[in-house]
Image (tube, rainbow, N blue to C red):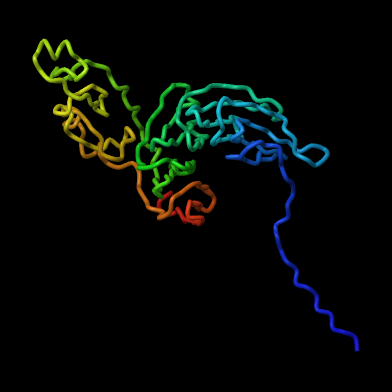
């Protein structure tokens, strides 16, 4: 009697299509070029590389560009072919890619202490997250040169995603905070801090103003700045604190007494909501079709979130 043959069960598994090798250090970010057999990568080895698939079936760089510092993150907009790259030295460099992805033209460079990047294609605004807990909204498309600050995290900003259909920005930080920003409001640029040798209200000298201290026989005071008007003030004249959401300050910050009186309850209305992911976030990805958010943490756990209740 012939032995019974038991067919082995089929095992389904991912199929490796290709391997792209050649980077000399860790590849921090890479994206597939939509509608192209190509990949853009940025690396710790200070390079930006555009890999295109050749007739041999292998990917080879069509562009190899060396940067002055290791590349930490990037954002690519296919519609404009604009590539924004953040570097460890605190600068963001922008490039415009040729239609055939065989050439990359430098456009501009600006400072931003970057840990995360994302692009709003409608307003043509670039968002950058920073290790100093802040987010900067750069007006790239409008060419107005404005830079609006958003303060809503207590730790390093690890990830940014933009929900263009609802005009909301999603940001995450290493302390597990998830913040949903309403970008459909008219935000104000924060003022530059003014320089002065004495308080711009009571005229008391600051501690480095030796001449005025000697002349007035007064001990110099520590300098502070009002976050609303930017004036240099002593502690007594800027003893109040307030949120200023339209200026990006969702937490209370120092303001002078005059500005504190001018801020209404309506001005203090929050423009962001805050949520705790309960793990230290190192990377995020937002899938707009289902409004799902993926967070991966230092705890080696990946969490999927339905953002419909807050991104709408």
Q: Position of residue 97 (x, y in %)?
A: 64, 27
Q: On screen, 279 above or below 6?
A: above
Q: On screen, 80 above or below 206?
A: below
Q: Count the marks: how many?
A: 0
Q: Name the residue rendered at 35%, 47% in the picture.
A: 273
* Residue 223 in which image quadrant: top left
- Image quarter where the N terminus lies is bottom right
Q: Name the residue rendered at 61%, 39% in the picture.
A: 27
Q: Name the residue rendered at 51%, 31% in the picture.
A: 88
Q: On screen, 309 above or below 214?
A: below
Is 253 placed left or right of 80 in the picture? left
Name of the residue lying farthest toward the bottom: 1
Is 121 placed left or right of 248 in the picture? right
Q: Position of residue 92 (x, y in %)?
A: 51, 28
Q: Position of residue 59 (x, y in %)?
A: 75, 38
Is 88 placed left or right of 183 in the picture? right
* Residue 22 in which image quadrant: top right
Name of the residue lying farthest toward the left: 217
Q: Position of residue 139 (x, y in %)?
A: 45, 27
Is 25 placed left or right of 142 in the picture? right
> Which of 295/96 is in front?
295
């Amino acid at each position: 009697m012939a032995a019974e043959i038991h067919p082995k069960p089929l095992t389904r598994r991912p199929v490796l299509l290709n391997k792209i090798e050649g980077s000399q250090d860790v590849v921090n970010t890479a994206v597939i070029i939509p509608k192209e057999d190509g990949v853009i990568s940025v690396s710790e080895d200070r390079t930006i590389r555009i890999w295109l698939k050749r007739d041999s079936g292998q990917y080879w760089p069509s562009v190899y560009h060396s940067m002055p510092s290791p590349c930490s993150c990037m954002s690519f907009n296919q519609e404009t072919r604009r590539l924004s790259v953040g570097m460890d030295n605190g600068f963001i460099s922008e490039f415009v890619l040729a239609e055939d992805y065989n050439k990359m033209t430098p456009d501009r460079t600006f400072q931003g202490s970057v840990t995360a990047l994302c692009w709003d294609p409608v307003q043509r605004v670039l968002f950058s997250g920073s290790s100093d807990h802040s987010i900067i909204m750069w007006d790239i498309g409008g060419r107005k040169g404005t830079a609006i600050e958003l303060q809503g995290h207590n730790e390093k900003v690890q990830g940014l995603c933009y929900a263009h259909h609802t005009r909301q920005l999603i940001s995450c930080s290493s302390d597990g905070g998830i913040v949903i920003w309403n970008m459909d409001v008219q935000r104000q640029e924060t003022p530059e801090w003014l320089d002065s040798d004495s308080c711009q209200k009571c005229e008391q000298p600051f501690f480095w103003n030796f001449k005025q201290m000697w002349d007035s026989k007064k001990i110099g005071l520590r300098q502070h700045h009002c976050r609303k008007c930017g004036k240099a003030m002593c502690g007594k004249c800027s003893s109040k604190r307030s949120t200023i959401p339209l200026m990006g300050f969702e937490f209370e910050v120092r303001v002078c007494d005059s500005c504190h009186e001018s801020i209404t309850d309506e001005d203090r209305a929050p423009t962001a909501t805050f949520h705790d992911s309960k793990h230290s976030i190192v990377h995020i990805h937002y899938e707009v079709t289902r409004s799902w958010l993926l967070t991966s943490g230092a705890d080696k756990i990946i969490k999927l979130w339905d953002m419909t209740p807050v991104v709408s």
